[in-house]
Image (cartoon, helix red, strand yellow):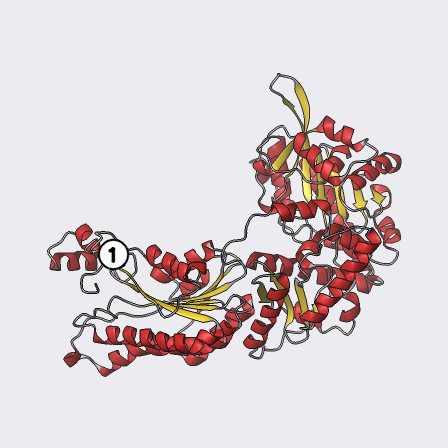
Amino acid sequence: MNSRWNDAEAAQYPGDLGQRVYSSRLLGRDSALVLHGGGNTSVKSREKNIFGEEEDILYVKGSGWDLETIEAAGFSPCRLNHLLKLAKLPELSDLQMANELKGCLTNSAAPMPSVEAILHAILPGKFVDHTHADALIAITNTAGGLNRVQEVFGDRVVFIPYVMPGFKLARLCAELFPQKATGKTIGLVLMNHGLFTFGDTAKVAYERMIELVTLAEAYLAKNKAWELKSPAPASPPRPARLEIAALRKEISAAMGGPAILAVQGTAAGHAFARRPDVATISQQGPATPDHVIRTKRIPMLGRDVAAFRAAYQAYFDACAAQAGRKLVMLDPAPRVLLDADLGLCTMGRTAKEAAIAADIYHHTIDIISRATALGGWQALPALEIFDVEYWDLEQAKLRAAGKAPAFAGEVALVTGAASGIGKACVDSLLKRGAAVVGLDVNPAITKLYSRPDFHGIVCDLTQEASLATAVEEAVRKFGGLDMLILNAGIFPPGAPIADMKSDLWHKVMSVNLDANFLLLRECHPLLKLAPNGGRVVVIGSKNVPAPGPGASAYSASKAAVNQLVRVAALEWGKDRIRLNSLHPNMVFDTALWTPEILASRAKHYGLSVEEYKTNNVLKTEVSSRDVAELAAEMCGPLFAKTTAAQVPVDGGNDRVI
């Protein structure tokens, strides 16, 4: 492992807290050290309080912040002396500890301090770094792991047996560290958990971390357990969208609401799922207890959700009885699935949760594989994992979690999504918590957003094979389909029927009618499997109820789609699928309406541009966002009992009225 420290970069982060921010980000950039909010860092400083008295302050990473992107505001300022006194208490429940941590903040607006704040306080050195380095976990999680890490690090570190994070761990470290530390000690190993290093400067603490992790990597390499065999490329996937969507529906039921199911499609995931010993090595537990909330204790093997739920119930009952605790079971749905055909799949209540589970489990695969090669993978006992999963502090987080967005766990597909009304629909759906797949012929669709809940696909909807491939890709990305927004269309230059060219007529029908028919047909089986019922919204046109001269192809195609949707509403009601249409008019913030065209049309009517844009009964301008917001609402509970409706979004058009 190489140091990323750069003196010139570091100089741009002045002061103790600035240096703490810089080196924390260096740690966070390396996923082999920390993942998604894992790990924590701190710095000890002196500041004057409101009375002008100097106090020792520990700035420790706050809850909810990620080391890779942390800012100064992400560190919680705690009174150091208070933390040191807490470390000397004989007993303290973790809920009491959390209350004390909150009470010792010097800034009430700061985030909740890390549960390991007391441990940071007792360790020497101004700067303290803590990671869950993959190489270290691969060594500690083997038979004889303690002997191995002692062989790797010798007297450079103090070794602490596994204790669940919280006050008990801090208390144990407060007792053992002073007894075991020597003049050569630069770190602390928490067995089956992680590594601490410390130093008087941010650079020293950081480079000690890199030094110790490099030693662990070298030990694995020496024992032929570092270089992993490159997995064979995954074979081309066969169409499986209906199988995936059906599996997602079962998992959603176990989770108590719609869930995202992401088929990762990685060679490493496929290879691990097909290992002959996967049923043994994958079922022991996570790489560290810190991952249990996001990945569950074990992955589901194959696609038998009922069997997984039964196994989880048995695990819960046995551990709760052994712990002597009365608890309410969390949802027994898996978060990771290993299947010989699908490979690695991950689940979550949001696309972000599923993406985090994927990142964690890809690292888990490497850790398990290396530990197995080193001498045998050995996770913590089930009860230790259970104690973290049903930890009072984790339960408190769940209780404090806000209400989920309206479309959390649901998947929407939007056509013509790169701009205009289509892009606005993407935005409205994302805002409501949906995972969104955008289709467009414009290659810009693939870069529209870089976030885990959006996926852009270049697709010519008039090509049946291309459309089917896009739908398959959408399902593999998020697991199914709940909402379909049919927005893509073309508006050709005006031409009277007598002058209409056949090729133009067929082109308009191909895009505006035939493509929508094909997409409805392809998506119907998926919409049937939507946990909360399928929803379709068609972006029609004012030309459906009030056509204009020169727009025969456009008007006819839009009217035909509207009629198609009415028939679909009759046929699909039994499948819990509702379909509704919106008829916008004069939506000027789209690519169709250039400033030149706007000026020309306004002049034609003897109006200013502003008068032309509000030339309706309500004298209001209709935007893409207006249309998109109503489209999104039509997919929500307000329209739960409405199907085959046609709603104008035009400010009131006298011809329509």
Residue at 59% across / 34% down in the picture?
110
Give the residue pinned by disc 1: 651
Asked if residue 482 lies left or right of residue 108, the reply is left
Asked if residue 486 lies left or right of residue 528, the reply is left
Q: SS of the residue at dot 1?
A: loop
Residue at 68% across / 73% down in the picture?
304
Residue at 64% across / 38% down in the picture?
112
- Type of residue at label 1? Gly
Instruction: Decide which of 45, 625 is in the foreground and name it.
Output: 625
Instruction: Decide which of 652, 135 is in the foreground and name it.
Output: 652
Query: In this picture, is 179 found above or below 440?
Result: above
Query: In this picture, is 243 found above or below 384?
Result: below
Callout count: 1
**Residue at the limit of the structure toward the front, as seen here:** 641
Query: Percent position (x, y) of residue 277?
Result: 79, 71
Query: Percent position (x, y) of residue 354?
Result: 60, 60
Q: Can residue 354 be seen at all in this image of the molecule?
A: yes
Asked if residue 376 lies left or right of residue 209, the reply is right
Query: Percent position (x, y) of residue 210?
Result: 72, 46
The picture quadrant where one finds residue 254 is: bottom right
**Residue at the limit of the structure toward the left, as seen here:** 606
Instruction: Decide which of 435, 307 is in the foreground and name it.
Output: 307
Query: Percent position (x, y) of residue 88?
Result: 81, 31
Q: Can residue 139 be seen at all in this image of the molecule?
A: no
